[in-house]
Image (spheres, rainbow, N blue to C red):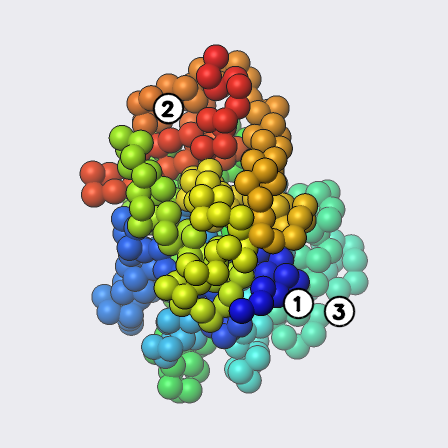
Amino acid sequence: MKLDLVRFFQACNPSKTLVVSKPEDRQYYIDFSKVRGAKIIEELGRTITRLAPEEPTCQLFTGHIGCGKSTELLRLKAELEQQGFHVVYFESSQSLDMADIDVTDILLAVAREVSQSLEAIKIHLKPASFQTLFTELAKLLQTPIELGGELSVGIAKITAKTKDSPKLRQTLRQHLEPRTNGILESINKELLKPAKEKLKQQGKKGLVVIVDNLDQVHNVVKPSGSSQAEYLFVERGEQLSQLNCHVVYTIPLVLIFSNTLGRLTYRFATDPKVLPMVPVKFQDGSQFLQGIMLLQQMVMVRAFPGVSWEQSQHLISKVFDSPETLERLCLVSGGHLRNLLMLLFRCIQQEDPPLSQECVNRVIKQRCNELSLAITADEWEVLREVAQQKSLRGHERYELLLRSMFVFEYRDEDGSWFDINPILAEAKEFGL
């Protein structure tokens, strides 16, 4: 069997999210739930379909950036659609400025995406209070906004005007902020409630909104002194939880380890679900063979889609100079899926398969140098501690270490534990 290099290269693009509902993407999907320690997507789906199909639910989902959350959420979307739900999935980073987000921005983004999705299936709703609001905003922004008949068009035009202008956005915020509860009420009564009724008439079981990428909000401090993540999900979480449909939000992983977790859980009346890393080792440092095998499978299916793992094991020599080279790549990724693809992507940029151990080592060293440049002497000390104790509790720097991908979280039947990014273990500073 011949390796199609161009297709292999494209399939390894670390910035590409697999859309499981598409057959060409589904062939690359590997289910890691068996080794991750929890069936998170099943839990999210079960809450909606089995436990509260008629009542609005609000659930929180988190994990390291790049560990596969978007792929899993798109799988959830596909499964919910198969069960008769109308699902609106969108990436908040496409329309919002992640360095400066307010609750009204999220609410309006939900309203826009829901109405756009409904318009696509010939459900046209025109909430009267929004027509009034748009007229006010057009005057306020002193810019002519041609408001079409569709709600999504009106919101899109206003957000487009303000997205690249902090000054206009500030003006808009000052006007909308005191009206947050009114906007929420309008969305619920004039958009979501009639939307669910119309969807039922079309034979749908309900409406689900999945807001992805909110875990990527920037770590800026708001005037209140809270970080942007705490402001949105803790201080204002109650409003985000009140939408009259099923909602799943992604939230920054750092909130799970902050002292605001109790308040966050109280605001949303639910525990955040965490998607952990794919473990490649046990806490005692011995290799976790099942995790390594699934990562190897993920690599080989990108090279030979549609070929079973049993068959593709015999094809490793077409992709790597030895099975050990593939294993080295999987181990050094630490079970972080995007890291693994990024290392593989860089290797393919440097030479044709079969990829050599020298090439893999060169790419690992290059990545190690890039990460090491950002680490201070104090942080190396903390990293050495984490590597020994497998714990991160009590460190005020946990936020930086997690956000910077210096430390990874794993879960097993005993709970969560931590380890440093294996690439950093190769740095000379780590051994000092």
Query: In the depicted view, which residue is nearer to us: 2 or 172?
Result: 2
Where residue 413 is drawn, which disc sits there? none
Residue 203 vs residue 158: left or right?
left
Dot 1 or dot 3: first in sequence order is 3
Local packing at callout 2 (Cα closer than 10 Å; few below 14, some 14-19, many 20+) is: some
Residue 285 vs residue 21: left or right?
left
Residue 60 visible, this orientation: no
Q: What kind of element bears circle 1?
A: helix
Q: Position of residue 404 (x, y in %)?
A: 52, 33
Where residue 386 is drawn, which disc sits there? 2
Residue 208 vs residue 175: left or right?
left
Disc 1: which residue: 154
| Residue 277 in which image quadrant | top left
Local packing at callout 1 (Cα closer than 10 Å; few below 14, some 14-19, many 20+) is: some
Q: Position of residue 372 (x, y in %)?
A: 57, 25
Query: In the depicted view, which residue is nearer to us: 201 or 293?
Result: 293
Local packing at callout 3 (Cα closer than 10 Å; few below 14, some 14-19, many 20+) is: few
Dot 1 or dot 2: first in sequence order is 1
Callout 2 amino acid: Val
Callout 3 amino acid: Glu
Q: Residue at x 32, y 55 (%)?
A: 33
